[in-house]
């Protein structure tokens, strides 16, 4: 009887170890979280970076190369890149498709629907050259301004795909690593979100053996798409507490990991 029980116990131990192993598909953790911040805002340097550094997390900052916030604080952007944060390519002028409904606000000078594909590619390449001059790095990711993937119905990212580890979009889905489209990586746009809402998204990802890419703009102000600084801090607090199970990394590191998983 005793022997039988021992045998049963052994099966249980082996099985639970196996189950745990199979659910650790993200760099040996249960899921991954990517913290991305768009549009080169001052609050990223003033609010976000000090918070991330406090917890030892690395974020991805999708910068607009022509932004005065870049020109005015060049040394600080360079310093955060040297500290392990990623400077992602969010193009030179952030063109958005002004021909779409509700896009009356688009400046004709930065209207993607008036761009040729050649011009879009040229400006993306120029931004890569600028970012390399700034941080010395050869690898980075791209983020579509306004999540506009096409010009006149034609995609343009395929022409620069070889220069990036991946391109972040903003479709809030929970794919497993093998099903991620690296040319349009999922993203959860956060506007006025509470920490509780964002944590629920992480827990859903964990269940689905997936990951969450948070898309932030303002954090503590400076942009109409804003998240309260306190809620952002609570989110980081949660991520720190769950460090054993959640992999927090840059879009670059997670995109490279996904690529490796897909070519296995
Ligand atoms: Zn943007």
Image (tube, rainbow, N blue to C red):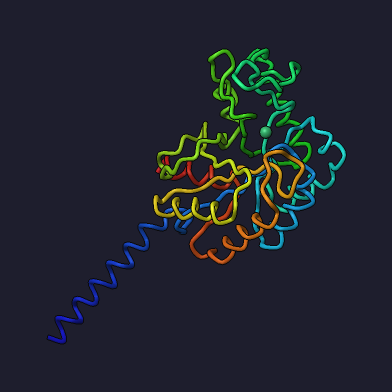
Q: Nearer the viewer, residue 170 or 229?
A: 229
Query: In the image as oriented, which residue stretches furthest toward the bottom?
Result: 2
Quadrant of the rendered image containing residue 40 = top right
Residue 201 vertical placement versus 19 (above, below):
above
* Residue plotted at (47% across, 34% down): 181
**Ligand 1: quadrant of the figure:** top right
Query: In the image as oriented, which residue stretches furthest toward the left?
Result: 1
Residue 147 vertical placement versus 249 (above, below):
above
Is the N terminus in the top left, top right, bottom left or bottom right quadrant?
Answer: bottom left
- Image check: 224 left or right of 183? right
Q: Residue 192: image x %, image y %?
A: 63, 46
* Residue plotted at (74% across, 37% down): 132
Q: Nearer the viewer, residue 199 or 10?
A: 199
Q: Residue 185: image x %, image y %?
A: 52, 37
Is the C terminus in the top left, top right, bottom left or bottom right quadrant?
Answer: top left
Quadrant of the rendered image containing residue 72 = top right
* Residue plotted at (58% across, 41% down): 189
Q: Residue 92: image x %, image y %?
A: 74, 27
Q: Nearer the viewer, residue 197 or 146?
A: 197
Please tell me how many numbered marks the rendered image carries: 0
Residue 61 vertical placement versus 22 (above, below):
above
Q: Residue 199: image x %, image y %?
A: 53, 55
* Residue plotted at (53% across, 42% down): 255
């Amino acid at each position: 009887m005793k022997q039988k029980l021992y045998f049963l116990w052994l099966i249980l131990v082996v099985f639970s170890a196996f189950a745990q192993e199979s659910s650790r598909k993200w760099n040996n953790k249960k899921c991954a979280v990517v913290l991305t911040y768009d549009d080169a805002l001052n609050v990223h340097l003033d609010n976000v970076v000090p918070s991330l550094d406090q917890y030892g997390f690395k974020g991805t900052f999708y910068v607009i190369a022509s932004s005065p916030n870049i020109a005015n604080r060049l040394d600080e952007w360079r310093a955060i890149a040297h500290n392990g944060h990623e400077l992602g390519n969010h193009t030179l002028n952030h063109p958005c498709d002004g021909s779409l409904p509700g896009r009356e606000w688009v400046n004709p000078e930065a209207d993607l629907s008036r761009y040729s594909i050649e011009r879009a590619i040229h400006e993306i390449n120029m931004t890569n050259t600028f970012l390399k001059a700034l941080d010395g790095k050869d690898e980075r990711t791209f983020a579509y301004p306004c999540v506009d993937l096409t010009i006149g119905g034609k995609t343009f990212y395929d022409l620069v795909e070889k220069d990036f580890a991946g391109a972040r979009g903003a479709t809030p889905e929970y794919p497993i690593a093998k099903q991620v489209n690296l040319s349009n990586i999922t993203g959860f746009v956060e506007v006025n979100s509470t920490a509780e809402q964002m944590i629920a998204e992480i827990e859903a990802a964990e269940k689905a053996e997936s990951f969450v890419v948070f898309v932030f703009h303002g954090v503590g102000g400076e942009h109409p798409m804003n998240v309260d600084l306190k809620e952002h801090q609570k989110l980081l607090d949660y991520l720190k507490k769950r460090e054993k199970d959640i992999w927090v990394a840059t879009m670059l590191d997670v995109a490279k990991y996904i690529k490796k998983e897909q070519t296995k």
